[in-house]
Amino acid sequence: MTLVDTRTPDPKRLIPGATGDWEIIIGLEVHAQVTSNSKLFSGASTRFGKDANSNVSLVDAAMPGMLPVINEECVRQAVRTGLGLKAQINNRSVFDRKNYFYPDLPQGYQISQFKDPIVGEGEIIISVGPDRQGQFEDIEIGIERLHLEQDAGKSMHDQHPAMSYVDLNRSGVALMEIVSKPDMRSADEAKAYVTKLRSILRYLGTCDGNMDEGSMRADVNVSVRKPGGEFGTRCEIKNVNSIRFVGQAIDYEARRQIGIIEDGGTIDQETRLFDPGKGETRSMRSKEDAHDYRYFPDPDLLPLEFDDAFVEALKADLPELPDDKKARFVADMGLSIYDASILVSEKAVADYFEEVASGRDGKMTANWIINDLLGALNKSGKGIEETPVSPAQLGGVIDLIKDGTISGKIAKDLFEIIWEEGGDPAEVVEARGMKQVTDTGAIEKAVDEVIAANPDQVAKAQAKPALAGWFVGQVMKATGGKANPKAVQDLVKAKLGIEE
């Protein structure tokens, strides 16, 4: 691909070196396993976690005379992904043979796409931030292409002291290779890109995005240059399988390259691996160019062709994607961009929010989900799918606050009870005597007692009205947090003679 510089150097993204500032240039090739029951060119299962070599057909094992047959569902998923990336859909594409030898590649070549991919140029909008002012910066990252290809198997070098084993379960699994343009300029941007891409794929249902299972992984291309100068020589870091590792690999590799250049050396174009334990990259092999793979059209597969009606039917069935959903949450529910961004980051979280927010205050619902529910899930190491608090239960807590049955403080305690023990929020409040005290006579009695016991504080509060909050806190403490906070505040000010 022809490299085009789309960005003006930004001082806050430059890295200081011994000879001045440097700019990182980053492009990503993300391999995303297509969500399908069978492989790209065979009927073998794609189910994860099966015994070694149990998901292997004669085609996957490259037995003589076995011919590949295209899986139409994988084609649909690739087109849907392209539409989600606002990309050009190519009605005609060609499968090529990419020739190289590796023990877990039974055919001695990989069926991929080279000059004529199924999806052309597109874009992803990433948001980087918030900065110190709470602002986000939206950046457009170009997509160069998306092509379909088959995965290789897996070599296992730790099963025997003298031999390596090969598991062909992944051999022939359908991958979408999504190639970005070299538009990213920091590790934070690259992490935001992978996060956003994974979110889009999950919304579309075209890839589960489980990086720990290998169904999504990134090849990270990194080079450095003086700001605004010529592109430098890039190194490719292969098969990075976590977003955190993507950031760490980029930071290390950029500083490694800067150090070499500033010491008078040159960067070799090579493929490297990232070692998470040591936090460093290490050389794997020299980087091949396209001609090294001797690409040519696969003679066993006809060109892949479909019409506009096929594409339009898929487009009509696309779900609401993260950017559109975020815009709707901000416009219709009055959420901040920050809150909306968190809620749409995962489809399951967005769905949970919409169920709770239906007929309720959107901002209050967002606060409870982001601060309380997601906080508790993160603390316990659970995902939203594993939450012990259902949308109906959280909605019930919010309803009890809204109708004045409980205070915000009591609601926190109620949430803890529901999290640990379950139950209907209204029934729990009734059974445990957690209702908010709204009887002004009882509240007034508590206020009088606190004021009578603290004459010194009375004088201070009358001189400095802001100190009235101390009395409110003492009354709430005396009533076990059950008193209506607004009623307490009004009575304290009235008793102390403090004007509004």
Image (spheres, rainbow, N blue to C red):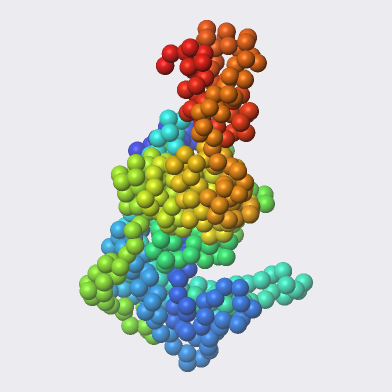
Name the one closer to the observer, 27 or 350.
350
Q: At x 60% / y 16%, what residue is drawn?
A: 451
- Examine the rendered structure and indicate whether residue 451 appears above or below residue 3: above
Asked if one can make out residue 27 in the rendered structure from this viewpoint, the answer is no
Considering depth in this image, is 29 or 484 the residue closer to the camera? 484
Residue 297 pos. (x, y %): 36, 78
Q: Is residue 132 visible?
A: yes
> Measured from the top left, where is residue 468 in percent x and y?
53, 17
Outermost bottom residue: 65
| Image quarter of residue 131 | top left
- Residue lying at the far right of the rendered structure: 161
Q: Answer with left or right where residue 447 lies relative to residue 140.
A: right
* Quadrant position of the C terminus in the picture: top left
How many numbered tags mark residues here?
Answer: 0
State left or right for residue 463 relative to residue 122: right
Residue 492, percent from left and from top: 52, 19
Residue 485's spot in the image, x, y percent? 51, 30
Q: Residue at x 22, y 74 (%)?
A: 309
Image side of residue 420 versus residue 463, left or right: right
Which residue is outermost to the left? 308
* Residue appearing at x 48%, y 12% in the figure: 497
Q: Nearer the viewer, residue 377 or 31?
A: 377
* Residue 225, above or below 165: above
Q: Residue at x 51, y 32 (%)?
A: 439
438 versus 489 height, above or below? below
Q: Quadrant of the N terminus?
A: bottom left
Q: Nearer the viewer, residue 45 or 340?
A: 340
